Image (cartoon, rainbow, N blue to C red):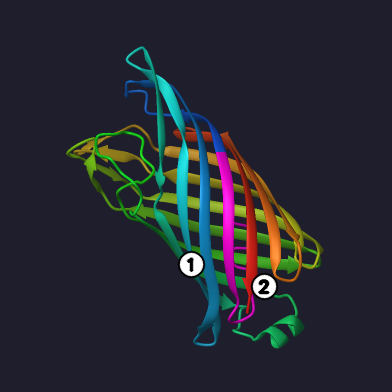
Amino acid sequence: MEPRAYSPAPNGAQFVLLTYGHQSGDVLLDSSLPLEDVSIKFNLLSIGYGRTFNLAGRQANVAVLAPYLWGTAQGTVFEDQVKVRRSGGGDLRVRFSTLLKGGAALGPKEFVQQKPATIIGVSVSIVVPTGQYDPARLVNPGSNRWAFKPEVGISRPAGRWTFELMGGAWLFTGNNSFLGNSRREQKLMASFQGGVIYTLRPRMWVSANTTFYSGGSTVINGTANNDRQKNARIGATFSYPLNQQQSLKVVWAKGVTTRIGGKLNTVVVGWQYAWF
C-alpha cells in the first residue's frame, strides 16, 4: 500500500524515515509441496532516505530503504511440526519516480502557491539482493535475486478528496542457490492499486486502499509449479503532522482473498523528518 506515492513536493526536499512493522498470518502454498498449515510472525525495522530534484523541469524523487527482519515461521512438514526463527538484514529497496503531468519542479515558495491538479507519474522500484541468505534454508531474510517493478500512477484531486490508481508489474531474476544448487525462477506478477484520500487539514490525511496482484508462478529447475498468485488486500493509512518537519504515519493492511502466498495482517508505524 503506497498512498500519495505520486504526490508533488517542493524541489530539494529531503526526508529520513524510520518504520516498525509487524506481520502475522497464514501462508498458502502449492498443494504439491510437503508443507501444510504454514504461519508466520515477523517484525520489520527499517530506515530510509529520500529527496526530490529537478529532472528536465519535472519533479523527480529517489528513495532508499534498508530493512532488518526477525520473527518465526512454523508449519507441518511430512506430518512433523516445525518452527524456525530467523533474523537478519533484508534486501535493500530503491525507488525512482518522476511526474510527467502536474509536477513541475518548483521551489518551496512557488510550490505553496500552486493549485491542486491531476498528476500522472511513473516509477521503477528495485529490490537489491543484499539481505542475509543461506541456500540451505527455505526461509531467509533475503531473496538472493533482483526484482524490478515499473509502474504508472494517476492522482486526481476533488476538493478535500484525492483519487488514485496505479498499475505495474514485478519482474524477477533467477535464484541459482535455492535450497542448495537448485534454480528458482518466478514469472511476471502484475500489480494494481486503487485508493481514496481525505485531507483533514494540511499534512493530516487518511486513506483507504485496495490492491490486487496476479501471476508470479515459480519454476524449479525447469519444472513449473501450480502456484500462480491471485490475491487482494485492503488497507488504511493515517498521517499526522507533529510539527513543520516531523510527522507520524500508521498503516494497517489485511489479506482478503489469497490463492497462493501470505494472507497476512500488517501494522506499520513510521516517523518521518523532512527538511529543505
Residue 123 is labelled as 1
With respect to residue 61, does 227 lie above or below? above
Q: Are marks 2 and 1 in contact (CB under 8 Å)?
A: no
Q: Tag 2: residue type?
A: Thr
Q: Residue 175, can we see it?
A: yes
With respect to residue 26, does 151 lie above or below? below
Q: Image point 60% across, 83% down: which residue?
A: 104
Q: Image point 79% across, 68% down: which residue?
A: 202
Q: Which residue is mark 2?
A: 118
Quadrant location of residue 29? top left
Q: Residue 209: where, in percent of width, then height?
A: 65, 50
Please, what secondary structure does the residue beneath circle 1 have? strand
Quadrant containing the C terminus in the rendered view: bottom right
Residue 26 left/right relative to 217: right
Residue 107 left/right relative to 232: right
Please, what secondary structure does the residue beneath circle 2 have? loop
Q: Residue 236: where, in percent of width, then height?
A: 68, 48
